[in-house]
Image (spheres, coloured by chain):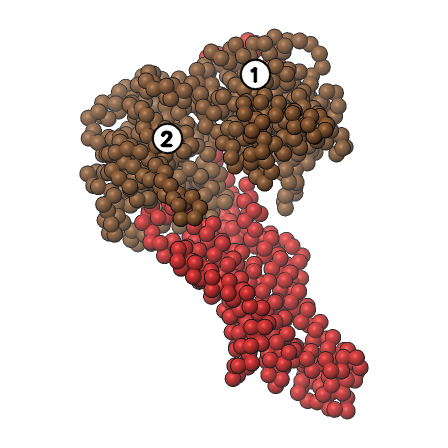
Amino acid sequence: MPSNDSSALSADHFVADLEETPIRAVDAIDESEKPRSSWNDAWDSMKRRPTFWIAAGLILVVVVVALFPGLFTSVDPRAAELTKSNQGGESGHLLGFTLQGADVFSRIIWGTRASLTVGLLATIIVTLVGIVIGSLAGFYGGWLDAIVSRIGDIFFAIPTVLGAIVLMSILPTRTPLTVALVLSVFAWPQIARVMRGSVLSARGSDYVTASAALGVSRFRILLRHVVPNAITPVIVVATVSLGTFIVAEATLSFLGIGLPPSTMSWGNDINAARTSLRVSPAPLFWPAAALSVTVLSFLLMGDVVRDALDPKARARR
Amino acid sequence: MTSETTTSPRAERTGEPGAPLLEIKGLKIGFKTQAGYVDAVRGVDITMRQGESLAIVGESGSGKSTTATSIIDLLPGTGQVTGGQILFDGKDLTKASAAEMQAIRGREIGYVPQDPMSNLNPVWSIGFQVEEAIRANGIATGKQAVRARAIEVLKEAGLGDADQRLKQFPHQFSGGMRQRVLIGIGLSSRPKLLIADEPTSALDVTVQRRILDHLESLTRDYGTSVLFITHDLGLAAERAEKLVVMYKGRVVESGPSKEILANPQHPYTKRLVAAAPSLASRRIQSTIEPASTADLGVTAAGSDDAELIARAHQREEAGKAAADYITVDSLSKTYRIRQGGFKTTELKAVDEVSFRIPKGTTMALVGESGSGKSTVAKLVLQLESITSGTVSIGGQNVGALRGKELFDFRRRVQPVFQDPYGSLDPMYSVGNTIAEPLATHGIGDRASRQARVRELLDQVSLPASTVNRYPNELSGGQRQRIAVARALALKPDVIVLDEAVSALDVLVQGQILDLLTDLQTELGLTYLFITHDLAVVRLIADNVAVMQKGRIVESGTTDDIFAQPSKQYTRELLEAIPGAHFEFGR
């Protein structure tokens, strides 16, 4: 340095006290901090939200009920005493009886499995199909994209319920699987669209170019770099759509073309209770409430997941 | 020199007594995060007088922009003033109501934002946006008067044909023109203070110079005080009479610009001044012995140690002797651009470009945006197909490579890109990112790859524990080190650096340039260095080619080009470097 003689400085030349403004090595890494992936970050932000715990708790309860309905009720949901038709609650049968005289609570518990199965199956099918088709269309573009996008548009144009009514009425068997499949046929374009858009933006990033310059094959780039970075919006949409599939199953069952009446489901029970709604609303109200709470918990979960995975929230520093 | 003459009338004014126009006392600003308040500004004092120009200098995260935006109460997100005072004309702005602030913003304090691309609303015409500002500040009323004033404002801002351009939209304006519009808006109500937050960082140097010259003459005419926020020490020295150096939310040094730069006192300021690239600096010479792994010391830019000069001569001699490793011959690239319907036009991005790079040397390709320099990089890397001409690397015609040959070629030529935030996959840990090239080319087994990753991290001076980290935890400079390590993994001969240090703070930039120089000496690498920044070229390149509109206008050794540029365009570029001829204390 030429001179460090501070007496030569002009009056308004201020120099901070060195003790108070220590300088650190340029660009040092804080080794004490725990390594964090963006999934860690997402988890950290989720677990701080009460909404997450409420939604997770409700979903857990619904799943356990679906798996082990016997744990929650010892009453046979199929045992019906016509003398108790539409009667109110009594000891051991808190929520009262259906038109046929079956226990409402027990039917709700046993109906959970069918409703949840349809929701889960449809979500899994739609997500897988949507991710595969959306990624291929978005990544490879060209004629593949053009064809797939137009096919998707065609399915978009058909109202899901209307299309499902037509398809369900020509199907020979009606099981949770077929209902899920039929719903998927009309719902995949939504996920595919989301995935395609997300892949399009990830495809142009520098890390993709960098991998290409390393000699990584196109397909491997898609698999290893593009899909993992493009998948978060799909997870959000999928979580939300799980709720809507459960509703759709109830709608179809209500219309009498979903699950057969022999299968216990909330939609069927709502349908059965419809005729005596004015006399006794309870047999309709309780399965509807179970449906709403389940769907709400998945929607809440979708909300929390979206907040946690939001790419804008992810840029931490 | 222009800065001498232009700043002198101001300098007379600074001596005048009187109350300061802006006085910031003990300002503290915090941002609310999930983990509580994080302090961004920790007790800042700044004093500005009427007609004075002051620059706040600091690296990203130093709190300079936060301080500036707090003056007009436009702190982003969850930011909040947690202590101190901002006295403007004797009034404490931290206590002003929202309505009072609104009256002050625009009318008394103008603001020129950083990014001209995103700060004009693309769906409204330029005229509408200027008129909006004029109406909001009550400068003129009545349709005719507002319109007339808008034209006047744009003319003052340097848009001669303002009356015709009023109806045009932002996308029809270049970056420089947009910034002129923003400056016009900022000055439209003749504010007492203009805050210019990195006003020209997004622009090419020659445009930057014209804009700053214009801004300077306008503010001098109106007697407006200007508060510059910048990361560029050269720009600060040239454009502001007073300097405030910020570091980690505090002022470490403040005072007259020239004095601070000539005689920096605080260690941080010293560091900053030493790292500032200028035309006076020399090429960085590695302190390590060629092909040895001894002492990985870091050299200061422009050090004139006798041994280093000797080594510089050595390099030069070696450069002359070395055979050309990369030969580019009348290389052209034409893009077809769809013009709506089925019509297409051709755009010649690269036009008959030829150059040679001897083995083990650095060649810089310099040009402003749109000059085609990055396209050349993509062609050399074979990420785009060549329209005509040849690129040959180590005697191999790159354009003709297919399949297996192309795959093997990728081992020898590796890129490092500009954006350190975009070039690493955020879902990949650092270890996986660096190991990817090894896995792709099937080199070694898992254990040996891990060992190689640790070795590479060491080569780029990062601790081995970085392996498990993710890009979002690292700073821009650290990410760029990772990108360099990934490029080195396959032991390439050539690295193409596309604006590899442009996004980094000056100290970090210096560090990366030192690292690149050391690696070149150690591993005998050949660099093709693409940049818009001539000051950086001086530090790293042996040879330079200047590109303009797809063509090379001038090329030669770095020393020759900087000492005697023969083309007008090169001279303009050199002249436009902020603080180019400024004497930095070293």
Which chain corresponds to the colour red?
A: A
Give the residue type at disc 1.
Answer: Ser
SS for dot 2 = loop
Rendering quarter of residue B541: top left
> Any idea which chain is the brown one in this picture?
B
In the rendered view, tell whether residue B38 sits above or below residue B240.
below
Image mark 2: chain: B
Mark pair 1, 2: CA separation = 30 Å
Q: Which residue is mark 1?
A: B217
Quarter of the image with the C terminus of chain B in it: top left
Q: Give the number of the mark in front: 1 or 2.
A: 2
**x 41%, y 29%: residue:** B368
Relative to B374, residue A42 above or below? below
Residue type at the position of mark 2? Lys
Q: Position of residue B528 (x, y in %)?
A: 32, 33
Q: Which numbered disc, 1 or 2, marks the residue that appears first in the sequence?
A: 1
Q: Is residue A273 left or right of residue A116?
A: right
Relative depth, front residue between B15 and A126: A126
* A237, above or below B11, in the image: below
* Frontmost residue, A29 versus B255: B255
Question: Mark 2 highlights which residue?
Answer: B549
Q: Are marks 1 and 2 in contact (CB under 8 Å)?
A: no
| As drawn, A216 above or below B168 | below
User: Can residue A112 be spotted in the picture?
Assistant: no
Kindly identify the residue that appears in the image at 48 percent across and 38 percent down: B475
Q: Is residue B245 left or right of residue B104?
A: left
